[in-house]
Amino acid sequence: MEKWFDTRRRYLHLQHCHTVARHVGLRSSWQKTKVQNLGAGDDVGDVTTCSQTVEGVSKFVYLGSQQSSMGRCAEDVFRRIGIASLAVNSMQRVWRHQRLSTETKFHLYRVCILSILLYGSECWTLPREDLRRLKAFHTRSYRQILGLQWFHFVSNDEVLNIPGLPHILEIIDRRRLQLFGHVVRLESNVPGHRALRQAICVRGNIRPDSRWRRPRGRPRQTWLQHIADGSPFGIRTEWHCQSWSRGVDATDLCCLRHLMNEMNE
């Protein structure tokens, strides 16, 4: 009975999307439409609507990112590393070119490779294993650009500490903070803003409802935890800074953060 109800609900949602799209002159492409359950529950089955069968999937590429029903980003990280590896190999002639300076090669790497590797990384929640894979690819690419082999006896730490080379974790943290600030500065009635505010309240032990209970088991690492780790201030301080920064000049934002931090202390 419950399974039938879920199928019926998905059918009604698809019908509603189809009806709304027709009112604005759009036509639904059922061959490209997929049904997926994100983050909770079992995999969904196919749904029939408008005499068309909409496929139920467990993973799906949406706007260039691999969406998994488990709610994790490991598959998207694997996919990004694979695509970036092809791009690195296709530019071997550039890395070996004698007349190009190392600075130019690094600039090309940031523009052509990192933009592929870190596409959508501001939404990633990275466990240590996925972060290790990203660092390994990052270091291996630097070695190719510098022409370093094993017999040069140069450690990975020495490669990553070369002045002017961006650290991949710093890039991801900066992108997360930019997305966090963008969502915070949205209007209060926007669903994304409301969802983020509710998540921060739950993190601060403020329950959304008296009947709400945290799921059993060890809490998984969350996106907000990454924000807290990548910021020198707490989540609430960042929230207030970004909210107040709507009318504040960017040069004064750092001073505003320090002021909020002193107030919290």
Image (cartoon, grey):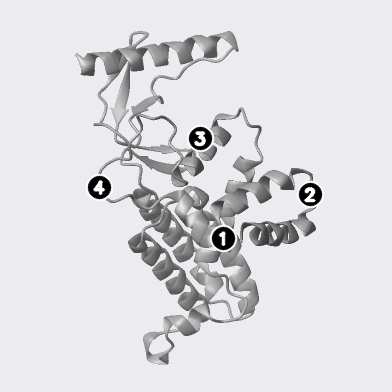
Residue flagged by tag 4: what amino acid is it? Gly
- Number of the label disc, if any, that sits on residue 231: 1
Residue flagged by tag 1: what amino acid is it? Ser
For the residues labelled 1 and 2, the Cα–Cα distance comes to 19 Å
**Neighbours of disc 4 within 10 Å: few (<14), some (14-19), many (20+):** few
Regarding mark 4 in the picture, which secondary structure is present there? loop
- Number of the label disc, if any, that sits on residue 195: 3
Q: Earlier in the sequence, mark 4 or mark 1?
A: 4
Q: In this image, 76 relative to 118: left or right?
A: left
Regarding mark 1 in the picture, which secondary structure is present there? loop
Can residue 113 be seen here? The reply is no
**Would you name the residue on which mark 4 appears?**
217
Q: Are marks 2 and 4 in contact (CB under 8 Å)?
A: no
Q: Where is residue 137, by image quadrant? A: bottom left
Q: Earlier in the sequence, mark 3 or mark 4?
A: 3
Q: Residue at x 42, y 64 (%)?
A: 134
- Number of the label disc, if any, that sits on residue 248: 2
Q: Earlier in the sequence, mark 1 or mark 2?
A: 1
Q: In this image, 259 relative to 80: left or right?
A: right
**In the rendered view, would you say 39 is above or below 4?**
below
**Neighbours of disc 2 within 10 Å: few (<14), some (14-19), many (20+):** few
